[in-house]
């Protein structure tokens, strides 16, 4: 059975989308173009912050809630291990892109491309595993007060952070994810967060990917 679309699905889609964009941009990066390399490093740093925040929230709230409910107990240490591996891979790529921004030589470009490919493999392994084995264990409990409390904690961010978050996830999102957002978040809220409070993302990150969200 296909798992329902959730905000978790939308976040995963944004992560995969940005890694696709980064790989495509690096494939076309001319030797010596440190300005473009710096733009890519800045955009990727934003992805890093969102991804780290996402998994810190899972470790702080989702996994303990699952443990308390006795859900998929054998998977919880695996999720933590995969989070650690993913964090290390993501940070390795961040370092490679920072080096590339300082020296966009052919060897540095090649190293960055290889790092992104390794990170994508690690990220996909975890996201696929979570979507296939963990989410189905949570789905039957999504209307419970306990899970609603977890969701509330996951959403508890400063308004400016929520603005950048909504600008990020809606930047070129998949049609099914856009439909989900429209069905669950009031349009004025999406507008205020994504278009008003998300101005920083739209100014500093979206243009790197060639989009004016």
Image (cartoon, grey):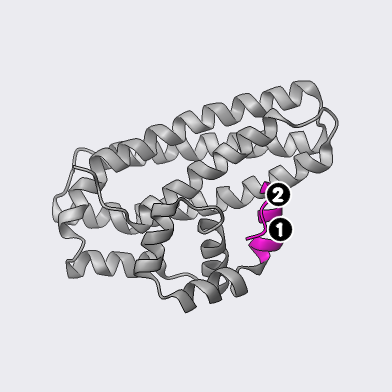
In the rendered image, is residue 158 in sight?
no
**Dot 1 crowding, Cα within 10 Å, few <14, some 14–19, many 20+:** few
> In the image, 25: left or right of 130?
right
Q: Position of residue 73 (x, y in %)?
A: 18, 43
Q: Nearer the viewer, residue 154 or 109?
A: 109
Dot 2 corresponds to which residue? 208
Instruction: Tell me the SS state at disc 1.
Output: helix
Rendered view: 33 above or below 59: above
Q: Position of residue 92 (x, y in %)?
A: 60, 34
Q: Position of residue 123 (x, y in %)?
A: 45, 36
Which quarter of the picture shows residue 187? Answer: bottom left
Dot 1 corresponds to which residue? 204
Which quarter of the picture shows residue 91? Answer: top right
Residue at figure coordinates x 82%, y 27% from the top left: 31
> In the image, 16: left or right of 179?
right
Q: CA distance from mark 2 to mark 1?
A: 8 Å
In the displayed orientation, state which residue is furthest to the right.
32
Magenta part mainly helix, strand or loop? helix
Residue at figure coordinates x 63%, y 45% from the top left: 44
Q: Quadrant for the N terminus, please.
A: top left
Asked if the stretch drawn in magenta spans residue 116, the answer is no
Instruction: Tell me the SS state at disc 2.
Output: helix
Rendered view: 128 above or below 183: above
Residue at figure coordinates x 40%, y 64% from the top left: 181
Q: Which residues are magenta?
A: 200-213
């Amino acid at each position: 059975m296909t798992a329902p679309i959730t905000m978790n699905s939308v976040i995963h889609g944004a992560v995969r989308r940005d890694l696709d964009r980064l790989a495509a941009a690096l494939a076309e990066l001319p030797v010596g173009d440190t300005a473009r390399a710096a733009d890519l490093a800045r955009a990727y740093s934003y992805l890093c912050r969102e991804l780290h925040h996402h998994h810190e929230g899972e470790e702080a709230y989702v996994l303990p809630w699952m443990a308390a409910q006795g859900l998929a107990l054998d998977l919880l240490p695996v999720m933590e291990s995969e989070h650690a591996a993913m964090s290390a891979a993501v940070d390795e790529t961040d370092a490679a892109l920072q080096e590339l921004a300082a020296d966009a030589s052919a060897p540095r470009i090649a190293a960055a491309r290889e790092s992104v490919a390794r990170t994508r493999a690690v990220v996909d392994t975890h996201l696929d595993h979570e979507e296939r084995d963990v989410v189905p264990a949570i789905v039957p409990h999504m209307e419970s007060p306990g899970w609603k409390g977890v969701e509330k904690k996951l959403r508890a961010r400063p308004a400016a952070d929520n603005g950048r978050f909504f600008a990020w996830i809606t930047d070129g999102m998949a049609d099914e994810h856009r439909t989900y957002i429209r069905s669950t978040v009031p349009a004025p809220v999406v507008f205020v967060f994504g278009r008003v409070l998300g101005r920083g993302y739209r100014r500093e990150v979206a243009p790197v990917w060639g989009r004016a969200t």
